[in-house]
Amino acid sequence: MSEQTPSHGHEDGHDHDHDHDHDRDHGHEALHGDALARGQAIRAEALEQILIDKGILTATEVDNYIETWNTRIGPMVGARVVARAWVDDDFKARLQADATGAVTEVGVNPGRLERLEVVVNEPGVHHVVCCTLCSCYPWTILGLPPNWYKSPEYRSRIVREPRTVLAEMGLELDDDVRIQVWDSSAEVRYLVVPERPAGTEHLDEDALAQLVTRDSMIGVGRPATP
Ligand code: FE
């Protein structure tokens, strides 16, 4: 067993040897998150109104943009990539050889991607993604990164003690599973293809895509089971 981490992972000296009460932490974050979200929503509405008043944007353009983000950019795009990889070994091979090109086969706009690398979980090997420097994330296929992905705690600890961090996030891996941590950058983003859940042999590609969670494509969770 070995745990490989990027050579330039930050060693920021934080010690996290106390036990976290994660329900409490999440509740705490949610409270602050609500106030923050309200403030951001008010500012965004004011900005939208100014841009419309000045004739720089129309309300229709804003609606179309929001519609795009809600329906065509987000984890549902990555889920299509994963589901195709589960049912089509040739596609999976193309993904591993040239992910940026292969994802166009499921309708991803390559112009919006930096270089994409796809890493595939298998028995005994588990991949997980972070950005130690900031918050680089394949947003075209996963949407906006979750807050924890951007937190200094996740970014520093996932490279130093991935097994512990994953367990705290609810993903217990056997000791003989090797964990590979991938450090994203402005140039390279990563997508994890999780293992296809057992008992899904009868499901078609669309049904399989419904099981693929955002967290499973970052490598901090498993897909849902049918
Ligand atoms: Fe980053």
Image (spheres, grey):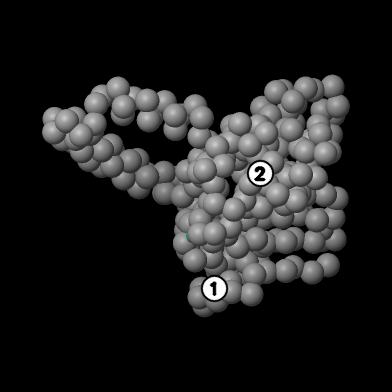
In percent of width and height, residue 41 lies at 28, 37
Q: What kind of element bears circle 2?
A: helix
In percent of width and height, residue 195 lies at 78, 42
Identity of the residue drawn at 50% across and 34% down = 73
Alpha-carbon neighbours of circle 1 within 10 Å: few (<14), some, or many (≥20)?
some
For the C terminus, give its image quadrant.
Answer: top right
Identity of the residue drawn at 37% across and 30% down = 65
Identity of the residue drawn at 58% across and 66% down = 157
Tell me: residue 169, above or below residue 158.
above
Q: Which amino acid does label 1 sit on?
A: His
Residue at numbered disc 2:
101
Q: What residue type is labelled 2?
A: Gly
Q: Nearer the viewer, residue 194 or 37?
A: 194
Tell me: residue 141, above or below residue 67.
below
Q: What kind of element bears circle 1?
A: loop
Q: Nearer the viewer, residue 110 or 74?
A: 110
Q: Is residue 1 visible?
A: yes
Residue at numbered disc 1:
10
Tell me: residue 225, above or below residue 95.
above
Q: Can residue 172 be seen in this view?
A: no
